Image: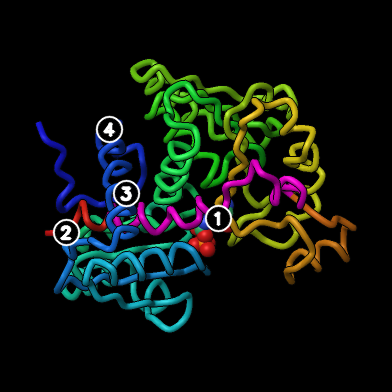
Amino acid sequence: MAVNLKGRSFLKLLDFTPREIRYLLDLSRDLKRAKYAGVEQKTMEGKNVVLLFQKDSTRTRCAFEVGALDQGAHVTYLGPSGSQFGKKESVEDSAKVLGRMYDAIQFRGYKQSDVEALAKYSGVPVYNGLTDEFHPTQILADFLTVEEHLGYLKGRKLVFAGDARNNMGNSLMVGAAKMGMHFVAAAPKDLWPDVALVNQCKEIAKETGAKIEMCDDMLKACKDADVIYTDVWVSMGEPEEVWASRIKDLKPFQVNMAAIKVAKSEVIFMHCLPAFHDLNTEVAQDVHKKFGLTEMEVTNEVFNSKHSVVFEEAENRLHTIKAVMVATIGK
Ligand code: CP
Ligand code: NVA
C-alpha cells in the first residue's frame, strides 16, 4: 500500500514506520531539489499554521515559517510570552480553540504530554518542534544530511556524545533504531537514555538490523564512527545550577580532534545547533567567567573543520519540516 500521512501528527519517531520515515526523507530531497531548480509546486495554499513556542528558537521557527510560506500557507507565531497558553488557559482548551482556526499546530515546549494532548484535543495535525523528551523534526534533517554526505543510513555508526538522556540523544537513538543504524551513546552512565526507551529501541533493532549501545569511554565509542554528533551540555529549561556538574561529567565527552582521529577518515561532525564552540555568545562568556572554559561540547577546530556539516544540517531543517507539512496537510 502507498504511504499516506494525510491528517497525521508528527509527535515522535516511535509513531512512524521505517517506510514512513523513508517517505519523508525522500519527499524532503524532492522538495529541496524543486526549490533549488525554481519549480516548487505550492500544495498548501489557503492553509493556516500556528507556531506555538514555550521556548526560544531560530532554526525551527524559521524552517516552519519559510516552509509554510514557500508552499503558499499562512503562519501565526505565538512566542514564549504573549498568548494565554498554559498560563490562563489549559492545554486542552487551547487545543480546542486553535484546532477551530488552524489546519495544523507546531508546538515547542517542555512536556511531551503537552504536545500529545494538543494532538488529542485539537483535531488537526500537530508537529513536535521540541520537547524535553524528543526533537523528531531535527532527526529528519540530520538523516537527510547523513545521506547527502555518506550515501545511506543502514549500518552507519552514529555516536552521540553528551547528555544522552535528553531530547537529542533520545530522538537520535529512536531514529537510528528505526533506520537500521549503529547508535552509540557516549556519556557517563548517569546521562545514558532511560532504560525503558533503550529496551524499546533494542526491540525495534531486532526488526531493522540496528545496533544500540551505551559507552562511557569517548575514544572507544568514536572508534570507526561515520558520524559524531553532539549537543549543548545544558538544555533549554534546565536550571543554571546544573552547569557545574554537567561540565565535570561531560568534559571527557567533548568532540575534539582526538575523537575525530579515531573515527573513519570521512567521518562527519554534526550538531543540532546552537553550539558553544567559542566565546562569541553571552552564555559562553558567562560560563567562561565562572568555569574558565573557552569551548564546550565541541572545539572550535572541529566545528570549523572539513568534517563539519552543521550548516547544511541547519538548512535541511527547512526542507524536512516542509516535507512533514506537505505530507500531512498538503493537497
Ligand atoms: N536545532 C534547533 O532546534 O534549533 P533552534 O532551537 O534554533 O530551533
Ligand atoms: N537539547 C537542546 C536542543 C536544542 C535544539 C535543548 O533542548 O536545548
Where is residue 109 drawn, in percent x and y? 45, 62
Principal secondary structure, stretch drawn in magenta = helix
The CA span between labels 4 and 3 is 17 Å
Q: Which residue is mark 4?
A: 17
Q: If the picture is divided into quarters, which one holds ligand 2?
A: bottom right
Residue linked to disc 2: 330
Badge 1: residue crowd in 10 Å (few <14, some 14–19, many ≥20): some
Circle 4 or circle 1, nearest the eye = 1
Compute the Cα span from label 2 to label 3. 13 Å
| Residue at x 46%, y 55% (from the top left corner) | 131
Q: Quadrant of residue 221?
A: top right
Query: 66 or 11: nearer the eye?
Result: 66
Q: Which residue does the numbered mark 3 point to in the structure image? A: 28
- Camera-near label (1 vs 2) is 1
Label 3 SS: helix
Q: Are marks 2 and 4 in contact (CB under 8 Å)?
A: no
Mark 4 or mark 1, earlier in chain? 4
**Mark 4 vs ligand 1: CB under 8 Å?**
no
Q: CA gap, disc 2 to disc 4? A: 20 Å
Check disc 1 and report the residue beneath it: 311
* First of labels 1, 2 by sequence position: 1
Q: Is residue 169 magenta?
A: no
Q: Of the residues shown, which amino acid type is indicated by label 4? A: Thr
| Mark positioned earlier in the residue sequence (2 or 4) | 4
Across and down, in percent, residue 314 comes to: 50, 56
The answer for how far apart the CA atoms under marks 3 and 1 are is 17 Å
Mark 4 or mark 3: name the one nearer the start of the chain. Answer: 4
The percent position of residue 27, horizontal first and vertical second, equals: 26, 46
Which stretch did the figure color magenta? 297-324
User: Quadrant location of the N terminus?
Assistant: top left
Answer whether residue 312 is magenta in the image.
yes
Q: Is residue 62 left or right of residue 222?
A: left
